[in-house]
Image: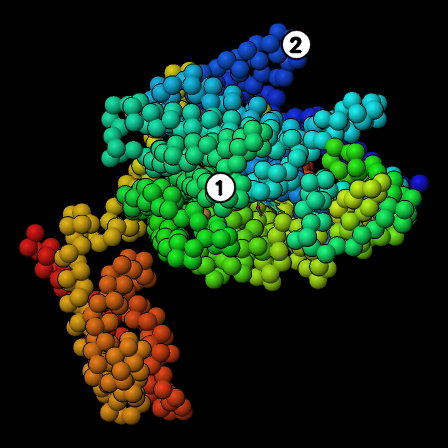
Amino acid sequence: MNRYLVTGAGLLVLLGFVCALAVVGSRRSGGDEGRVAASDGGYAPGHREGIDLSAGWLWNGLVRWTTTTDHKDIGILYIVFGTVAAFWGGLDGMMMRLELLTPAADVWSEATYNALFTTHGLTMLIFFVLPVFFGIGNYVLPLLIDADDMAFPRVNAVGFWLLPPALLLVRAGIFFQVGGQVLGFFLPPEEIALLLSVEEVGVGWTLYTPLSATSENPQITTLLLGLHLSGVATTVGAINFIATVVHERGPGITWANLDILSWNLLTTSAIALFAFPLLGSALVMLILDRTFGTAFFAVGNGGPVLWQHLFWFWGHPEVYIIFLPATGLLSTILPKFVGRKLFGFRFVVYSTLGIAVMSFGVWAHHMFVSGVDPRVKASFMAISLAIAVPSAIKTFNWLTTMWDGNVRLTAPMILCVGSIGTFVVGGVTGVFLAAVPIDVVYHGTYYVVGHFHLIVMGIIPYMMMAAGYYWYPLLTGRFYDRRLARFQSWLLVVGTTVTFGTLVVLGLLELPRRYANYPAEFAPLQQVASIGAFLIGMAVLLWLYNMVWSYWHGDPVESGDPWDLKATDQFTREWQWFESRLESRYGMQPTTPDAVRPSATADPDAGSPQFAKGVGSLAENTGRTVAGGLLAGFVGTMLMSGALFAAVAIGVFDTGSFAELAALAGLGDSVALGYTVFLLGGTTTWALLFLALQEYLPGRLRVGTGLAYATVMSLGFMIAFYSGQTGLALVGYVGFALVAHWLYGFGLAVVLEFLELRRTRRL
Amino acid sequence: MSEADEPWVVTYAAPLVGVLLVVVGISAGVLGGYSVVQSELGLCGSPSIHVASEETTAGYVGPDGPSLERLPVENLTDAEAAAFRTALDAPTREASIDGDVEHLAAFRAGVLVTYDGGERYVTLASLNECVGVPPLLFPLGVAAILFGAGGVLTPPLYRRLDAFENAAE
Ligand code: HEM
Ligand SMILES: [Cu+2]
C-alpha cells in the first residue's frame, strides 16, 4: 500500500473521531431539553416529537404526507423535493469543479464530464428552482391573499406528485449505467445488453439536434419523457396559482392591494402557462424523431435550427420563470429590514408584467451563432437590450427603498443586499451578450457560464434561503441560529462572487466552456473558481444544518411578530395569521410596540421616499413638474453662461469647445450652434435628471442638493470641454467651471423651490 | 453574553479562515486521495476507442468523404486489436485498450480500420489519463481540513470558554 494513502487514511479516521466527539458532546450538553417550544407555525405540534421509528409512526407519517392536500403541507413537500434536487444537481456541479482542478480530463472521463454538465443543468433549472418557488408560494400565497387553500387542492397534490417520477426518469441513466456495471460482474454481457447500452445523457442540457436525435443511447428518450412529465406538472401548478390569485382572494384583497410576491407568482405562472406546453410539443416531436421515424428535425425538414427555435422559445421565458419569483421575494423581504415600504411598488409590478411580455420576444439571442438571418438577429438584439430596462427599474427601486433607510443586517437582509450585487454584475454582463458582435466572440466561453450563474446562483438560491430565514419562525415557531446564519450568508456571497467572477474573467480570456480539459495556463484561475465553488458548497451545508438543528434547538419565538414588523407598519397578513394562531392555540397575547411609524411617508427620515414632495399622483404631477424643471434649467443655464462668458473674456475658456460640441451633435463646427446645443442640454436633459435624482442626493435643503448635483456634473464638464489649458490657465478653467456649475445648481434649485412654494400656497 | 460583545474575529474571521482551509483541504485531499486510489486500483491509463457503426463509416469512405488513413487490424497491437473487436460488439461501441498503445495519434485523428473484409471508422473516445498530482496532497489536505474545522468551531468554543470564565467569577 502507498504510504501517503495510509497517512491520509489515518488522518481521516482522526477526523471522523473528532466529528463523533463533537456530536456526542453536543448531545450531552443538549442545552435545550428543558425548554419546550411555546408555539408552532401550523403543522407540527408545539414541542418537537423525537424521531420514533416504530412501524405505526412511520406508516402514519407516510399516509399523511402522501395523501395531504393542505397547501402548507404540499408547500413543504415541494420545498423538500426541490432541495433534494438542488443537492443532486449541486453534487454534479461540485464533481465538475473537481475535474476542473486539473487541466487534463483525469478525475472523470470526458464522457462523464459531458453527462455531468447535462444533468447538472437540467436538474437545477427544472427540478430545483421552480419546485422550491412553487413550494414557498404554496405555503404563503394563500395566507397572503387570505384564501382558505389553493383553488384546486387535489390538482395541487397531483402536480407535485408528478415531479419525483419525472426526476427519476430524467436521471435514470445513472442507475442503469451503474446497475449494468454491477450486474456485468455476474451475468454475460448479452443478457444485459440493453442495460449496458444505457448511459447518462451527455448531449448538453439544450438537447440540440442532430446529436440528440441520432445518438443511440436509449436514456435520451427516457430523459425526454421525464422532462415532458415535469412540464405537465409545472403547467398544472401554474394554472392552480393563476386560479388561486384570481378567484380565491379573501374579502378586502383587491388587485390594488395585492402584495408583490403574489404579483410575481401570478406573472411567473402566466409565463409558464405559455412556455411549457410549447416545450412539451417540441419534446414529443423529438421523441417521435428518435423512436417513430418522423423527421421533424431532419435536415431538409425543419433542420437543427427548428429545434433551437422551439427550445429557446421556451428557454428564454424559463429564465424569467425562475428569476421573477426571486425578485418577488426580494421585494417582499428587503423592505421589512429597512423599515420602509417598497419604493415605487407600482413600477415594480409594471416592470414584472413588462418582463413577462418581452420575455417571449428575445429567444433568438441564444442563437446568434446559428444560421439565422442577420436582420432577424438585429431585431432580437434590440429587444434583448430593451429587456434590461424593467430589470433595472427593479434594481433602482430596491436601492431606493434602502436609501437612507433603517437597515437591519439580519441574515435575510445580507442575502438581499448580496443578491442585488450579484444581480447587477450578472445582469450587466448579460446586456453585453445581447449585442451580436460580442456574443459571437463570447458565446462559447466561460463568460456565459459566469454571467448566468451570477443570477442562477446569485439571486435565486439566495432568495430561497432568505425566505427560509424570514419565514422560519412562522414555519417552526422557532428562530434559527442567527449568528451562524449571518456567517453563512456572507460566506455564500463571497463564494459566489469568487467562483463566478473568476469564470467571467476566464471567459474574457476566451476559454471555451463545456470541456473537461483545458490548456494548463488556465489552471490557477480554474482552481480559484473551484475553491470558490466548494465555499458555496460549505455555505449551503451550513444553511441546511442550521435549518435542521434549529427545528429542535432554536429559540422559541416570543410573539407573533418576531421581526418587529408592527413598529414600521409592515405586519403583513401571513404574520397576522401566525399571531392569531399563537393566540388561539397557546394563549400568547399579541404584542404592541411602543411606537409605530408609517412605512411610507414623504418625510425622508421616516418612510419611503417619494418621487416629488407634492400631492397627487405621479401622472398628474409629471406635466407640471417637467415644465417647472425646464424653466429652472433655463434659468440655471443662463446664470452659468454668465460665468462662462466671463471665463472666455479672461481667456481661460475656449469658445472652440462649443464648436466641437456642435460637431459632435452633427451640426458642423459653429460656435453659435454649439452654444444652442449647450443651452438646450442645460434646460432639458440635465435639469430633468436633477428632478429624477434630487431625492437621493445628499443635502437636506434643495439648494444644497442642487450644489452637490452641480459639483458632480462639473467633473464631466471639465473633461469634456478641456482644450489644452495648462498652468494658471488650467487653474482658472477649473475654478470657473466649478463656479459656473454652482450657479447652475443654485438657479435650478431656487427656481424649483420657488415654484413649489407658489403652488403649495395656492393650494 | 450578548451577541454584540463577541469579537468579530471570533464570530466571522476565524470561521472564515477555517472554512477556507477546509475547502482547500477538500480540494487537495480529494484529488490527492483519488490519485492514489486510482493508480492502486488501475482505474486509469488505458485509453478507450469508439468504433463507428457501419452506416456512419459508410459516410466517411464514399467518394465525397474525407481522405482518411487506413489501418489493417493486423498492424494493431494485440491490446488495440482486442479493444477494437470488443468495441465492435459492445452496445456503446466503446472499449478500453488494456495494454500497449502504439497508434494513439491515428486514433486521435480518426482512422479507418480494415478487418475481415470490412472497415470501420475508429476514434479515440477517452484518453483516460491518471490524475497527475503529488500523492502528498492527500495527507496535507486532510490535515488542512482538521485545522480548518478548528477555525469553524471557534465561535462555539469561545462561547463555552466565556461562559466558563464568567461562571468562575
Ligand atoms: C453550486 C453552485 C454551482 C456550481 C459550482 C456550478 C458549476 C457549473 C459548471 C462547472 C458548469 C459547466 C461549465 C462548462 O463546462 O461549460 C455549469 C453549467 C451549468 N449550470 Fe451550474 N453550477 C452551480 C449552480 C447552478 C445553478 C443554481 C443553476 C440553475 C439554477 C445552474 C445551471 C447550470 C446550467 C444550465 C449549466 C449549463 C451551461 C451550458 O450548457 O454551458 N448551475 N455549472
Ligand atoms: Cu435568453
Q: Is mark 1 within 8 Å of ligand 2?
A: no
Above or below, A701 against A280 in this view is below
Could you say which is closer to the camera, residue B123 or residue A336?
B123
Judge if badges 1 and 2 mark residues of a common chain: yes
Amino acid tagged 2: Ser
Q: Which residue is mark 2?
A: A54
The crowding category of the residue bearing disc 2, from other C-alpha atoms within 10 Å (few below 14, some 14 to 19, many at least 20), is: few
Residue B17 screen position, x and y as percent: 67, 50
Residue A508 screen position, x and y as percent: 57, 61
Location of residue B90 by image quarter: top right
Q: Which residue is mark 1?
A: A301
Could you say which is closer to the camera, residue A735 or residue B132?
B132
Residue A732 screen position, x and y as percent: 33, 87
Could you say which is closer to the camera, residue A437 or residue A325?
A437
The crowding category of the residue bearing disc 1, from other C-alpha atoms within 10 Å (few below 14, some 14 to 19, many at least 20), is: few
Above or below, A606 against B168 in this view is below
